Image: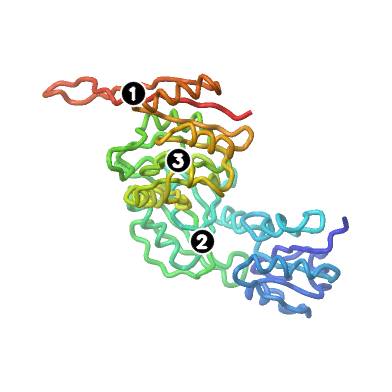
């Protein structure tokens, strides 16, 4: 199929920064789609102009109607790196599109900072919850972040400071590659700059001796979560996530989500992983939402209700965790919805729920294990082992 749509990355240097071939495409366009900034940067071209609508989904139909005309969409930098080019490519066959990449904000920022792109985390909070960057705050990490407005660097500075990373170095870069390029340097604990709304933030994470350590590997300390005592404890949670196998963009159903510890760690463990928590108690849903925000998993979706009824109509999951309320009906509804190669894990602490697991294991196979954790705790002036309630865990993969 012959490409009819051109998606062109443009920088602060406007048409002058484009290759001759790409500039010829823009200059020959009959219609150009873009934001106000993009139209300003290409103002020398005579073409019909269309602005981005809100919501963006309405633009896809508009773009499809441009077929048969010389159509150009202008975006910032690389159209396929945290840009609308990827969204358009999911709606329109990529064979109909020619992409013209420009230097991205990440490349320009890395060059300004003297950082190797291979050694940094590249993130965007543009149009997304800012809290999602919290999952990436770790000692000596370097972050390049596309922000969502002038106030975003100050919010990120607060996140860093609250977690013991106040000494982290922060640099805001704006209008990179143009005549109006600006740079603002400071530290998280004293950040006070007023910066342009369109900016890129570089963070060099520096941890204090008492900084909170929040690795992406599952098994966060229990006291990092708000909970009412009923939760999947740290060691069991790590074993549970290992069997659930978080993967990029995968969806988890957390049935009986409680304080959300398993769902939150699932989302932290893999880029763009998603989770739906099904929990009948409002107080526990509130705790789960608070934990998701505090620990960098703000897109946790919470549903009031009980399985199996609350499962009806949900998007099919890649993995399912049943932390409570297992029954044959719940298993059948969950198992039938699970995608091929999906992983299911169910934990039980009572004799009654253990009996359900054993019966299901007898019919469906999988792996059945008993997890017994002992923690050293004070016994008067001495120390002894205090056992946690043993957990029976059943796991299996849908083939």
Horizontal and vertical percent position of residue 211: 33, 43
Q: Nearer the viewer, mark 3 or mark 1?
A: 3
Q: On the image, numbered disc 2 is attached to which residue? A: 147
Which callout, 2 or 1, points at the residue further toward the start of the chain? 2
Foreground pick, 267 / 105: 267
Mark 3 residue crowding within 10 angstroms, few (<14) / some (14–19) / many (20+): many
Rendered image quadrant of residue 219: top left
Q: CA distance from mark 3 to mark 1?
A: 20 Å
Which residue is under mark 3?
255
* SS at circle 2: loop
Q: State whether residue 167 appears in this view.
A: no
- Total residue callouts: 3
Between the residue at mark 2 and the residue at mark 3, the CA separation in whole angstroms equals 34 Å
**Residue 199 relative to residue 131: left or right:** right
| 163 to 183, vertically: above or below | above
Q: Are marks 2 and 3 in contact (CB under 8 Å)?
A: no
Give the residue at mark 1.
390
Q: Quadrant of residue 225?
A: top left
The residue shown at (66%, 68%) is: 58
Task: Tell me which numbered mark, 3 or 1, is placed earlier along the sequence.
Answer: 3
Looking at the image, can residue 170 be seen? yes
Describe the element under mark 1 as helix, strand or loop: loop
Q: Residue at x 60, y 71 (%)?
A: 54
**Image x and y of residue 224, in percent:** 33, 42
Which residue is at the front of the view, 191 or 368?
Answer: 368
Which residue does the image show at 21% across and 26% down from the upper left? 377
Quarter of the image that includes the N terminus? bottom right
Q: Marks 1 and 2: in contact by CB < 8 Å?
A: no
Q: Nearer the viewer, residue 195 or 127?
A: 127
Q: Nearer the viewer, mark 2 or mark 3?
A: 3
In the displayed structure image, the side of residue 17 where residue 391 appears, left or right: left
Q: Is residue 32 left or right of residue 38?
A: right
């Amino acid at each position: 199929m012959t490409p009819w749509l051109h998606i062109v990355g443009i920088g602060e240097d406007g048409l002058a920064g484009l290759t001759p071939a790409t500039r010829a495409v823009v200059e020959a366009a009959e219609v150009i789609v873009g934001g106000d900034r993009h139209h300003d940067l290409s103002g020398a071209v005579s073409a019909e102009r269309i602005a981005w609508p809100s919501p963006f989904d309405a633009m896809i139909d508009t773009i499809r109607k441009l077929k048969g005309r010389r159509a150009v969409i202008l975006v910032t930098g690389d159209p396929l790196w945290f840009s609308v080019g990827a969204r358009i490519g999911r709606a329109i066959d990529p064979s109909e599109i020619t992409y013209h990449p420009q230097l991205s904000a990440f490349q320009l920022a890395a060059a300004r900072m003297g950082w190797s792109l291979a050694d940094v985390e590249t993130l965007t909070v543009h149009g997304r919850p800012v809290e999602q960057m919290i999952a990436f705050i770790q000692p000596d990490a370097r972050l390049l972040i596309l922000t969502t407005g002038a106030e975003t660097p100050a919010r990120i500075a607060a996140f860093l400071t609250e977690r013991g990373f106040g000494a982290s170095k922060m640099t805001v870069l704006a209008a990179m590659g143009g005549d109006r390029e600006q740079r603002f340097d400071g530290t998280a604990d004293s950040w006070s700059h007023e910066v342009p709304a369109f900016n890129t933030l570089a963070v060099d994470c520096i941890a204090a001796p008492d900084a909170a350590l929040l690795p992406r590997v599952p098994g966060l300390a229990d006291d990092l979560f708000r909970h009412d005592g009923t939760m999947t404890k740290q060691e069991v949670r790590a074993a549970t996530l290992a069997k659930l196998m978080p993967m990029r963009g995968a969806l988890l159903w957390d049935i009986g989500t409680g304080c959300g510890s398993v769902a939150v760690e699932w989302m932290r463990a893999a880029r763009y992983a998603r989770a739906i928590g099904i929990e009948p108690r409002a107080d526990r849903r509130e705790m789960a939402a608070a934990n998701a925000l505090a620990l960098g998993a703000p897109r946790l979706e919470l549903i009031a209700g009980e399985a199996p009824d609350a499962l009806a109509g949900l998007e099919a999951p890649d993995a399912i965790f049943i932390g409570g309320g297992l029954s044959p009906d719940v298993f059948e509804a969950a198992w039938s919805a699970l995608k091929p190669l999906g992983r299911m894990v169910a934990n039980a602490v009572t004799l009654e729920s253990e009996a359900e697991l054993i019966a299901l294991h007898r019919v469906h196979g999988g792996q059945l294990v008993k997890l017994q954790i002992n923690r050293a705790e004070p016994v008067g002036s001495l120390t002894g082992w205090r056992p946690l309630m043993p957990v029976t865990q059943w796991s299996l993969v849908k083939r």
